[in-house]
Amino acid sequence: MTATLSLPAPAKLNRMLHITGQRADGYHELQTLFQFLDHGDRLDFTLRDDAAIHLAPAIEGVPAESNLIMRAARLLSEAAVARGQVASSNDLPGVDIRLKKVLPMGGGLGGGSSDAATTLLALDHLWKLELDLDTLAELGLALGADVPVFVRGFSAWAEGIGERLEPAPLDTPWFVVIHPGIEVATPAVFGHPQLTRSSPAISMARALQGGRNDCEVVVRTLYPAVADALDWLDQFGTARLTGTGACVFCAFDDARQASKVLGRLDSERPTWHAFMARGCNLSPLHAALASA
Ligand SMILES: C[C@](O)(CO)[C@H](O)COP(=O)(O)OP(=O)(O)OC[C@H]1O[C@@H](n2ccc(N)nc2=O)[C@H](O)[C@@H]1O
Ligand SMILES: Nc1ncnc2c1ncn2[C@@H]1O[C@H](COP(=O)(O)OP(=O)(O)OP(=O)(O)O)[C@@H](O)[C@H]1O
């Protein structure tokens, strides 16, 4: 009998995001609070009798070899070879990976990064490599700045480019998340001359009291649809951008309030995609793996 490991790849929100500097290689130094949502993609992993790695269905516009899932699988198999755990990647069993894509791409919800982290942890488990989370997070960082937090699996205060992580005791409200139907190019935002790059560094305790997203001003200018979504959601509380957008979110004390706002969206802005989800401080991926 072939066993399938079915795991979530949750979304993240940046509850706040300050840009405190820029490194010599062009990457920006951030201070951000990451929190997971109980909403995201799902990946099924089934071992094969040969050594091939297959992913289906394909994501339109993303060639298989550029898909972060395939890149994560290859990176992990190369690491197993480099560490002498197997002589060649052909000695590892192949795997069929099925992706149920739920999260919008270029949405600031970290979907691709989360898929990559789920793949690293799933294949580490199925290939019985037993790499520790430090090693997997370091491998993940090579795939994207947001991968380490998904590998580690706890809500976090992040510094550096997102790789220095400390657990953060965040509240766990319900969120309404709106995707205004456009894709934001992260490099266009980080490359913009008007981006704030010199916010003073603050403590995590201060950030937990509330903060802004420094990308918001530039994203509002470049993408009027995002500005519209922020302004609409601001009627109900404090609307924020996650990452570099395009998604915006607002926190609510209970599910009833969140669902009322979703109802208003249906009638007032039927072309936007939106969902509600609960914030969680332990990643649903780690919760699922603990019982795998
Ligand atoms: C904005 C955040 O979503 C916050 O969580 C992330 O920092 C972005 O992470 P990501 O989408 O995984 O981004 P990456 O794929 O690593 O980087 C995309 C591009 O954005 C720019 N970039 C990204 C992250 C960062 N801290 N500084 C940057 O300047 C770089 O030009 C980079 O080439
Ligand atoms: N498995 C994947 N899922 C989504 N995007 C992928 C995947 N693999 C590669 N990509 C590429 O990565 C890009 C960014 O996708 P992603 O969904 O991670 O954006 P994002 O939510 O804005 O991420 P972040 O919050 O990390 O900036 C996509 O436009 C796509 O070209």
Image: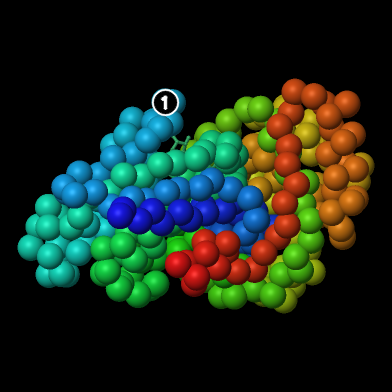
Its colouring scheme is rainbow
Which amino acid lies under the numbered mark 1 shown in the image of this protein?
Gly
Name which residue lies at 52% across and 54% down.
Answer: 8
The answer to whether any part of residue 60 appears in the image is yes
- Give percent across and percent down for residue 65: 28, 37
- Give percent across and percent down for residue 2: 31, 53
Closer to the camera in the image, 73 or 108: 73
Closer to the camera in the image, 135 or 238: 135
Horizontally, residue 118 falls left or right of residue 30, namely left
- Give percent across and percent down for residue 270: 80, 24
Quadrant in which the C terminus appears: bottom left
Q: Quadrant of residue 207?
A: bottom right
In the displayed orientation, state which residue is furthest to the front.
Answer: 1
| Badge 1 density bin: few <14, some 14–19, many ≥20, Cα 10 Å | few
- Mark 1 close to ligand 2, CB under 8 Å: yes
Above or below, 54 relative to 90: above
Q: Quadrant of residue 271?
A: top right
Horizontally, residue 277 falls left or right of residue 119, namely right
Name which residue lies at 47% across and 45% down.
Answer: 112
Above or below, 54 relative to 79: above
Closer to the camera in the image, 285 or 32: 285
Name which residue lies at 57% across and 64% down.
Answer: 283
Quadrant in which the N terminus appears: bottom left
Q: Quadrant of residue 128?
A: bottom left
In the displayed orientation, state which residue is furthest to the left.
Answer: 87
Residue hosting label 1: 61
Name which residue lies at 33% across and 30% down.
Answer: 63
Closer to the camera in the image, 184 or 150: 150
Q: Secondary structure at mark 1?
A: loop
Horizontally, residue 242 falls left or right of residue 124, namely right
- Give percent across and percent down for residue 175: 77, 52
Above or below, 182 relative to 157: above
